[in-house]
Image (cartoon, rainbow, N blue to C red):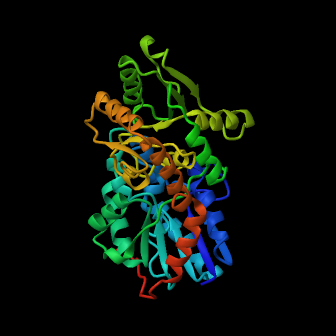
Amino acid sequence: MRHLLLATVEDPHNPKSWSGTPFNMRKALERNFERVSVLSSGTPQKGLLDGALRMAWGRQKYPLWMTRTALKTYAKRLIKEVQEQRPDAVLCISSQHLIYAGALDVPVYMISDAPWMAYKQAYQAYETIPLLAPTYARLEADMAKGIAGVIYPTPWACNEAIRRFGVDTHKVHLLPFGANSHCVDSDERVSARVRQRKLNPLRFLFIGKDWERKGGPLAVDVVNTLNAQGVQASLDVIGCQPALETRDQSHVRVLGYLSPDKPEDRATMAAAFAEADFFLVPSHAECFGLVFAEAQSYGLPCIALNSQGIPGVVDDQTTGLLFDASTSAMHIAQRILALIQAPGAYQRMALAARMKFTRELNWATFGSRIRSLITSSSGQSHDNTPP
């Protein structure tokens, strides 16, 4: 199998699109297939009825990409591209192109971070669920039954696909994404830095745009609790500008948004990773969490909640510590103290984190594994026409 068609509503040539995931995925595919054709579809123009409904309900309640008109347009584009390019297989990022595509006469795979409704329900406290969501979820489930396979980066997402789609387990494939930016140093250099960490004072790093969803208040509470127990600890915050209480400001340094396009911002980000002892992002909702992969590339143990896809990126008690959502800051602080006080325990966890990145959480590994997966296509009938 030499020629792969990659279809997406994102821009896989733009490293800023979806945090760089389609961009890095395309590059990984190009290293592993002789030819990769790309279909990148923007949102179709709205019809009069869709425009009126969008004005009545609002953009979040009535997104254009979810309308029947848009989905049929996506399908037509995919069908035309398959007919013209004649690929050996098709890989679609998310399901928009596939909902109404019907039989394509080639093996078709869909890859995403989670089944669409699983993602929306996980994030429902922070994002609006559109009016057309139940219909779209049903169409996605019907589509999944007719294609060669669906690919997700975490066990949680795979289990949600089996439960929601009703597909055979052999059609659901676990394949972690790679870190979109990462430490480029060798394993040996990262290991040497890990062994040089003094852990006194303790330095924690938080990265995220959504302060509440990412668990920023809990991260601050953990650092405050450690300081209250006589352990010097600080927290660097990147990606947002939270309003902090006066009592928190002595322990928290807010660096704000750092642009990957600016050399000085990239240097600041790299320094924050290099100077940290732990990556502390107790996110309440997370389908995957690419930043956990990035942190582990620096040999940082991750402190996080046992939320959705995070256990697929962070291995509890091996590359980090995971906690239930109801866990108190006091308990998290006590577990961190127990870790750093046990001889050799911190270093083993930090080195295991780096090894997880080296072996699993990188795009080179992704590329070779997805080629093996797609080239082993069973050749079954692939009819994804909705009933």
In the picture, measured across the screen, residue 369 lies left or right of residue 342, that is right
Query: Along the line of sight, which residue is nearer the eye, 280 or 59?
Result: 280
Horizontal side of residue 169 vs 182, given as left or right: left
State the quadrant of the C terminus. bottom left
- Is 149 left, or right, of 6 in this rendering? left
Q: How many marks?
A: 0
Q: Position of residue 340 (x, y in %)?
A: 42, 35
Judge whether 221 appears above or below 80 on screen.
above
How far across and down, in percent of the image, does residue 265 sit?
68, 34
- Which one is in front, 125 or 303? 303
In this rendered view, identify the residue nearer to me: 14 or 46: 14
- Residue extending farthest to the front is 343
Judge whether 80 appears above or below 224 on screen.
below
Q: Is residue 213 visible?
A: yes
Residue at the (37%, 29%) spot, across then down:
218
Q: Where's residue 3, x and y in %?
A: 63, 80
Residue at x 34%, y 55% (from the top left corner): 117
The one nearer the camera, 108 or 196, is 196
Residue 92 position in % (x across, y down):
52, 68
Q: Residue at x 35, y 77 (%)?
A: 170
